[in-house]
Image (cartoon, helix red, strand yellow):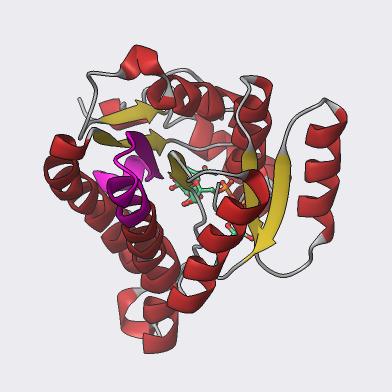
Amino acid sequence: MTGGATGIGRATATRLAGDGAAVVVNYIGDPSPAEELVADLRGDRGRALAVEADVSDEAQVEAMFDRAGEELGGEIDILVNNAGVERPYPLVDMPLEEWNRVLAVNLTGPFLCAREAARRLIAGRLPGVIVNVSSVHEVIPWPEFAHYCASKGGMKLFGQTIARELAPHEIRVVQVGPGAILTPINQDLIEDPDKRREVEEEIPWGRMGKPEEVAAAIAWLASAEAGYVTGSTLFVDGGMTLYPRFV
Ligand code: NAI
Ligand code: BGC
């Protein structure tokens, strides 16, 4: 579970551990939220491990998979590519550094992690699932977020392409596309009642989503019940992709 200490990642790590999975909580920076989560999961008799790694760094990703294998035993057979960042800039003001940072975390990170998971599963002749947490912005253009939309749109075709490559190895690849969810990435929005109302007016269901609602979709897609689903995106967005303002 990349970016597993907060938001959707945290809810999904909790859900998958509750379903019986041994969970690696990947994080970057302050270790406390990841370590607290791991302590909670272990307290519930789960198997969990916090591992720091920048998902955009090849060597750190390889080391994370090594550690997961050594400490939890066996290969990662459910990879959730969840880590992601965003920060708005109009195109004309967007620094190259910011463009590169968003693409590195949101797209190169999933590539590095998927490559590592697939290499190990194929070598061990093991089936598996890769769940990419994309976004409604896989299909909805979003002014001032060209880098973010490029990363999520890229993630969709990346996921669909490797879904074809990995199908003969019984490795499924799926995308989950959340709408506006109550997580730290949306802190400014959550704290501003006017902005929040504006966003909720764009959602046919009339409210922002909960991280647990995204976690439930990820858990189903990762389960054997979704065994014939590959390449698809499941939007969990209260209908945001129905373009409610279009008449
Ligand atoms: P969040 O900010 O709580 O989660 C993002 C996580 O990624 C954080 O834990 C952060 O530390 C981690 N991260 C950032 N850079 C990293 C790096 N280089 N290496 C490893 N971890 C790194 O926000 P949220 O909402 O839980 O985001 C999770 C995913 O969901 C992101 O990919 C985001 O784009 C996506 N998403 C979120 C939506 C929302 O409305 N909250 C809607 C659609 C998609
Ligand atoms: C973004 C959120 C935004 C949501 C709906 C997500 O991809 O991370 O910040 O609220 O899309 O626009």
Drawn side of residue 206 relative to residue 21, left or right? left
- Name the quarter where the C terminus is drawn: top left
Is residue 96 depicted above or below 138 in this figure?
below
Rendering coords of residue 82 (x, y %): 49, 49
| Any part of residue 182 in sight | no
Q: Viewer-proximal residue, 172 or 176?
A: 172
The residue drawn where x is 32% and y is 53% is 152
Is residue 22 depicted above or below 101 in this figure?
above
Q: Viewer-proximal residue, 245 or 70?
A: 70
| Any part of residue 235 in sight | yes
Residue 133: say if magenta.
yes
Q: Viewer-proximal residue, 192 or 129?
A: 129
Residue 86: say if magenta.
no
Is residue 244 depicted above or below 139 in this figure?
above
Boundaries of the magenta span: 118-140
Rendering coords of residue 26 (x, y %): 62, 55
